[in-house]
Image (spheres, grey):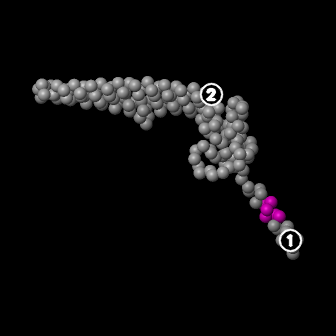
């Protein structure tokens, strides 16, 4: 009976061992910092963003100047002139809002540019992680940089350097 229970226990353990899942971690921030194309794309996005913000700021400044002039001259203006000046101010403010939406809105120029510059890099990382996980039998790969509440992880399961090597950016 003891032999039977021991055999049954070993069979159960070997069956469970077959179902064990392998996990790995990657650090996407670390990976991105080691890809020169990412740094270049980030700089391009920052330059465009600053340029567009200057355009918006200039329009807002014009609107402010128009408003200050209007306030200073308001007592000397007729009702028609007041309406005309108010309309100019509103038009300038609307232009600034529209430009901001055009550049920084949900489907704005910055979004489109980020998409065109970053998508190829993200796809390359994804494909490298996918290939590694398939070849090494990982059931799950987590990003430790995304704040998934990982309190501790054994450094031996971090495959970030393997991903970089797969992409041709060996350290």
Where is mark 1, residue-wise? Answer: 4
Q: Position of residue 75 (x, y in %)?
A: 13, 28
Q: Position of residue 68 (x, y in %)?
A: 23, 27
The answer to whether residue 98 is magenta is no
Most distant residue in the front direction: 72
The answer to whether residue 13 is magenta is yes
Viewer-closest of 43 and 133: 43
Q: Position of residue 12 (x, y in %)?
A: 79, 64
Most distant residue in the bottom direction: 1
- The residue located at (49%, 28%) in the rendering is 46
Instruction: Report the predominant secondary structure element of the magenta stretch.
Output: helix
Label 1 sits on a secondary structure element that is: helix
- The residue located at (34%, 31%) in the rendering is 98
Residue 100 visible in the snapshot: yes
Viewer-closest of 28 and 4: 28
Residue 80 visible in the snapshot: no
Viewer-closest of 105 and 152: 152
Image quadrant occupied by the C terminus: top right
Front of the two marks 2 and 1: 2
- The residue located at (68%, 39%) in the rendering is 160
Question: In the image, is 153 to the left or to the right of 51?
Answer: right
Q: Position of residue 103 (x, y in %)?
A: 42, 30
Question: In the image, is 28 to the left or to the right of 70?
Answer: right
Q: Which mark is residue 171?
A: none
- Please tell me how crowded label 2 is: few (under 14), some (14-19), or many (20+) other residues with Cα within 10 Å: few
Question: In the image, is 72 to the left or to the right of 6?
Answer: left
Q: Tell me which numbered mark, 2 or 1, is placed earlier along the sequence.
A: 1
In the rendered structure, which segment of residues is drawn in magenta? 10-15
On screen, residue 122 above or below 92 = below
Where is mark 2, residue-wise? Answer: 36
Residue 135, quarter of picture: top right
How far is mark 2 from mark 1, CA to CA? 61 Å
């Amino acid at each position: 009976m003891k032999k039977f229970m021991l055999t049954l226990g070993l069979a159960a353990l070997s069956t469970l061992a077959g179902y064990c899942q392998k996990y790995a971690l990657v650090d996407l921030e670390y990976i991105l910092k080691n890809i020169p194309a990412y740094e270049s794309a980030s700089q391009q996005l920052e330059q465009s963003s600053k340029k567009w913000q200057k355009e918006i700021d200039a329009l807002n400044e014009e609107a402010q100047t128009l408003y200050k002039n209007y306030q200073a001259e308001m007592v000397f203006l007729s009702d028609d002139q007041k309406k005309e000046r108010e309309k100019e101010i509103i038009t300038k403010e609307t232009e600034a809002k529209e430009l901001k939406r055009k550049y920084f809105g949900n489907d704005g120029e910055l979004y489109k540019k980020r998409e065109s510059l970053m998508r190829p890099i993200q796809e390359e990382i994804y494909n490298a992680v996918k290939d590694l996980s398939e070849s090494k039998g990982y059931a799950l790969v987590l990003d430790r940089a995304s704040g998934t509440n990982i309190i501790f992880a054994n450094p031996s399961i971090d495959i970030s350097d393997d991903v970089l090597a797969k992409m041709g950016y060996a350290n």
